[in-house]
Image (spheres, rainbow, N blue to C red):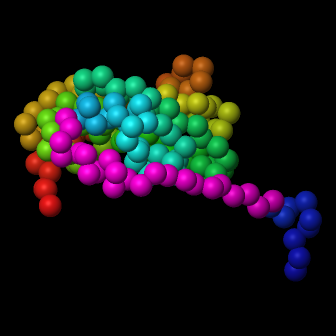
Amino acid sequence: MAEPEALIAEEREVLVRWRDPQVGLAQLPALDGIEFLQKIVSGDLPGAPIASHLNMDLVDVTHGTVTFRGQPDESHYNPIGMVHGGFVCTLLDSALGCAAHSTLAAGTGYTSIDIKTNFLRPVTADSGPLTCTGRVVKSGRRVIFAEGEVVDKDGKTVATASSSLLVFPLETT
């Protein structure tokens, strides 16, 4: 049985382009975290490819604090026409991780141990751009604790998160 013409969805597509991440990874062992991230902000090093997929950019870095901007669109929608929570959580995970990275010495890496996200209001394509700020609340030699929030274009908080991140030496090859 054919669907009524009015119910047939119009196809759309998104083109994703990114710069070779190996360029930045080659410099990672020699740069401390804040230098590395500031070079991404300035465009001297490529950002993470995931940022291109999700239409987000690292826009500001200071010691222990970073800001990302993300522009949701309908390609980020879940089945009920809202931006999928994974989009917002990825903004937060990126900001909290990079906030931790901004405090690390050269040759040191990090990975998320956990993230707890609180979604406070729905997000649609019209909510953006979203601004996500992550900040370190406690540094440690092995674990860093960070928190952050996402605000919509009107300055309303749409989500918050807290995370713990494992610190480790990077392996050099």
Identify the image quadrant of residue 118: top left
165 or 123, which lies in front?
Answer: 165
Please say if 40 is above or below 77. above
Left/right placement of residue 153 relative to residue 45 reads right
1 or 156, which lies in front?
Answer: 156
Left/right placement of residue 62 relative to residue 47 reads left
Where residue 13 appears, as percent x and y from the top left, is 69, 58
- Would residue 155 be visible to someone looking at this image? yes
111 or 148, which lies in front?
Answer: 111
Q: Residue at x 14, y 35 (%)?
A: 105
Where residue 69 appears, as percent x and y from the top left, is 50, 32
Left/right placement of residue 172 relative to residue 146 reads left
Please say if 16 is above or below 166. below
- Would residue 132 be visible to someone looking at this image? no
Identify the image quadrant of residue 129: top right
Where residue 79 appears, as percent x and y from the top left, is 64, 55
Q: Residue at x 28, y 37 (%)?
A: 36
Q: Residue at x 34, y 30 (%)?
A: 38
Identify the image quadrant of residue 167: top left
Q: Residue at x 65, y 55 (%)?
A: 14
Magenta range = 10-32
**Residue at the bottom extreme, as displayed:** 1
**Magenta segment main secondary structure:** loop
Where residue 115 appears, as percent x and y from the top left, is 31, 43
Name the quarter where the N terminus is drawn.
bottom right
